[in-house]
Each structure stands twice: as C-alpha cells, then as structure tokens.
Image (tube, helix red, strand yellow):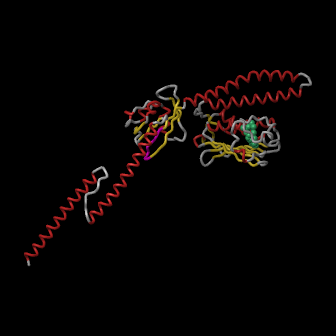
Amino acid sequence: MGTSFVSFLVGIAFAALGYSLSSIYRLRKVFSWLRQSGDSDPPESFGEWGELLDELHRLRRNYLARSSKLEQRIVHLQNSFASLDDAVVLLNKADEIDWINQSASRLLGLQESDQGQTLQNLLRQPDFLEYFEEGEYDKPLSLISPVSDTTELELLITRFGEANRMLFVRDVSDVRRLERTRTDFMANVSHELRTPLTVISGYLETMLDTDSDWQPALQQMQGQARRMEDLLKDLMQLNKLESVPEKKQHDVIELGSIIRTIFDEISVHKAQQKLELKLKTDAQLLGSHQELYGAFANLIHNASKYTPEDGTIIVAWQLEASGASLSVADTGIGIEAQHLGRLTERFYRADPSRHANTGGTGLGLAIVKHVLLRHQAGLSIESTPNVGSRFICHFPEDRVVRS
Ligand code: ADP
C-alpha cells in the first residue's frame, strides 16, 4: 500500500514536471514567434494554447494592418509637405526640430542636420522669439527671411499632439509688393489731386465774392470741390492707416475730454440736437490718441448727420465682462438690416439717394474699422429703421486702464 502510494506520487510529480517543461517549451516558442517582426504563422498548438495563439495571431494581424496604413499616411503626408512651396517645420514637446521640408532650407535657412536642435537657437529674430514664446497664434507673424533681406515671410504656428507645434511659413514678397504698389498709387494720386483742387477752390472763393449771375453755379462747384477735398482727406487717412505699421501705441486716453471736444464741434452746426455723455466708469483707454479721436469723431458726426435736429445722441463709456466699450446711440433714421454687414466697406452707403445731401464720403466707417483693428478692438452695429442706431466699439482688457 505504502509503496504504490509513493509510486503514484512520483508518477504525478513526473507528469507535472513533463507538463511544466512542455509549457515552458511552448511559451518559448510563442515568445520567439511574437518577437518576429513579420506576419508569420504562430507555432502549431492544440486545445487552449491553440485558441490563445489564434486570438494573438488575429490581434497581431490587425495591429500590423493598422500600423502599415498609418505609416503609409505619414509617408504620404511627408511627401505632400516635402513638395510644398511653403516651409513646414515639425517640433516636438521640447521645441526640438523633428522634421523639416526642403522649403524650410530655402526660406528659413534650416538644414536637415538641424533635426534634434532647439528651434529658438536657430531662428533668433526677436520678433519671432517673442511670438513663439507668447503662444498666441491666432494671427500670423510677418518677418523678413533670415536667408534674404528681400524675402518677406508670413509665419503661422499650429499646436498638435501633446504640446507639439507645427510651423507653416509662406513667402509673401509678391503679395506685399503688390499691396505697396496699390497704397503708393493711392497716396500719389491723392497727393497729386490736392494741389489743383486747392487752386480751383481758391479761384472759386474769389469768384464767389464778386457779384455775378454765375453765383448759383459757382456755389454748386464749391460744394463739389469741398466734397472732393473731403474724399481725398479720407482716402489719405485710410491709406496711412494701411501703410503705417501697427505700433504699440500707449497714450493714456481720458474719454470724457475727447467726447466733449467732439460734442462742441457738433453743437456749432446742430445747436438743437441733444448730446448726452454717460461715463459709467473712470477707466481710461490705451492707444493712439490721434487715431481714436478720428474714429470716435466719425461715429459721433455720423450719428448727428443721420439724426433730425430734435433728436438725441447718447455716448456711453462702460466696462464689459472683459474689456470696455464705447457706444454711440442716436434716435435717427436708422439702417435697414440688409446693409449692416457691409457698412464698413469703402464707399458703401446704405441708401445713396437718401443720403445724397449728407456730404458723406462713404469712407468714415472704413476708417473706424481700421483704427479699431489696430487697437485689437471690434465694432458691432445695432439699428432699427426710423428708430435709431447704436455703434459699439469693444476694447479688449489690455487696452483698459482701471483705476
Ligand atoms: P458717410 O460718409 O456716407 O457717412 P460712412 O462710412 O461714415 O460714410 O457710413 C457709411 C453709411 O452708413 C452711410 O452712408 C450711412 O448710410 C450709414 N450710417 C452710418 N452711420 C449711421 C447712423 N448713425 N445712422 C444711420 N445711418 C448711418
């Protein structure tokens, strides 16, 4: 009894040992199969081992198919980027260059051997470094190519993945040259027309002082000459706003005094109109005094122009959830909804026949929009025909000095 029990135990021990050895053998075979990189068949197995290997094989095939598709996509993308005229630079989390295309060498002077280097060590222009570090990439950056002084670039940065960044750089030299030609042409034409116009106006004034049958005609001519002078003045101002680069202008502006001066100008012509100023905050505004004065004067003069003598104009300066706003409201003729989106276009006038006598140029709101853009501000317009209009300038927080 004792001997057969011991033999039974020894038998079990041998069987267990045999099973463990065969399991280790199979496991080794599975590992060596898993380590192979291709899509080879798994080692032959039966029972549960077989099922496990079939499942592993299926998963592996799926994985290989997916990664080969991804690889193809990456190669396709890299090929597309490589052939682009625009420079593309991919950066990793540590701002090191992961990949560049050929145009990056032509436009930015980067080389393939720069891969792995920190970008800021290679592109050292202060404007670029400030833009790159600030991290506000909603507007593109204009810069001169480090390779050639005559190449003007526009640079855009997009974030992707885990804090990776991608730089897109376009050569905009031709576009800028065309823009300059256009603004130079406008400036020259406006300038050249001013001198003859001044001479004509001078003669008209002298002739108007004399008594003649031509008086009505001369008066009309003088009116038109004044209109042309206003047009040239507005065109020159718009041109200046477009061609003078945006500086960080930081005059501290006290709104109350600006608005009161503009009200005084209006009272001279429209003594009956009620002018109200509501200063709901004593916060001040940061920006170009001259440009903002021009913009607010345009809005308030418009309000007066399109409001009857017995109407009211209310200018209000108030804080908003973020930033502050200056609104100009009137009880005038109002504007039909279909015109609202186009009012800031050059020469757009809501109803030319209706406004034929206002003496407007159709450029005032285009100037306002430009000035506001240069102050990172926006314009919104609300209006109801025959009830009145409200033009609101919204300034961002960093343009507002709260006391
Ligand atoms: P304009 O010199 O003709 O006034 P603007 O560019 O200043 O040119 O304004 C464009 C058009 O917007 C005007 O012609 C007018 O139709 C309309 N507009 C501007 N402000 C007002 C206002 N306060 N009330 C009614 N219409 C206005």
Quarter of the view holding residue 392: top right
* Frontmost residue, 362 versus 131: 362
Residue positioned 35% across, 57% down in the render:
59
Relative image position of residue 379 (x, y in whole percent): 66, 43
Give the vertical position of 367 relative to 185 (above or below): below
Residue 316 appears in the picture as rendered: no
Quadrant in which ligand 1 is drawn: top right
Residue 164 left/right relative to 344? left
Q: In the drawing, does residue 38 fall left or right of residue 90?
A: left
Task: Inspect this view and state whether residue 200 appears.
Answer: yes
Q: Assess whether residue 186 is covered by the magenta stretch.
A: no
Q: Residue at x 86, y 26 (%)?
A: 218
Q: Which residues, given as a range, are shown in magenta?
A: 161-167
- Please name whichever residue, 399 or 238, is drawn nearer the observer in this view of the structure: 238
From the viewer's side, name the closer residue of 88 and 133: 88
The correct choice, above or below, for 7 with respect to 306 in the image is: below
Query: In which quadrant of the rendered image does the C terminus lie?
Result: top right
Please identify the quadrant where the N terminus is shown: bottom left
Hey, which quadrant is residue 254 in on the image?
A: top right
Residue 83 shown left or right of residue 373 in the figure: left
Percent position of residue 102, x then y: 43, 33
Numbered label tally:
0
